[in-house]
Image (tube, grey):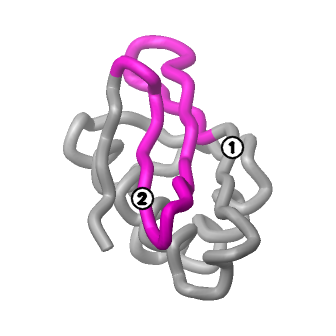
Amino acid sequence: MSVQHQPSAHRFTIKEAGHTSELVYELLAPGVIDFVHTYVDEATRGQGLADELARAGLAYARQQRLQVRTSCKFMAGFAERHRAEYADILAA
């Protein structure tokens, strides 16, 4: 499974079994990224695709030195479950 970043569309995607899963973000201000929406098609749920998208998005934020906000419920939960790993980039 390969995550693709589409910067012009502000999203990360995975194509699996003919379906596209996505993590959408907004750049709110210089240095701040907000993950606003995660979608995984029902046919491909339960395969860890959302987690892979989350990891890719957070790795991008770290690489770009962005502070992370998580308007998306899934991303908020993921960030909380992995707080120790991502505490340095999560916005207060």
At x 31% / y 41%, what residue is drawn?
5
Q: Main secondary structure of the magenta part?
A: strand
Q: Position of residue 56 (x, y in %)?
A: 35, 58
Residue 25 part of the magenta-drawn span: yes
Residue occupied by mark 1: 37
- Give the number of the disc on residue 85: none
Q: Alpha-carbon neighbours of circle 2 within 10 Å: few (<14), some, or many (≥20)?
A: many
Q: Position of residue 22 (x, y in %)?
A: 55, 49
Residue 65 quadrant: top left
Given the current orientation, which residue lies at the most extreme front position?
18
- In the figure, 20 relative to 79: above or below? above
- Give the number of the disc on residue 14: 2
* Magenta highlight range: 8-35
Looking at the picture, which amino acid does disc 2 mark?
Ile
At x 49% / y 20%, what residue is drawn?
27
In depth, the one of 56 and 82 nearer the eye is 56
At x 38% / y 23%, what residue is drawn?
31
Residue 66 quadrant: top left
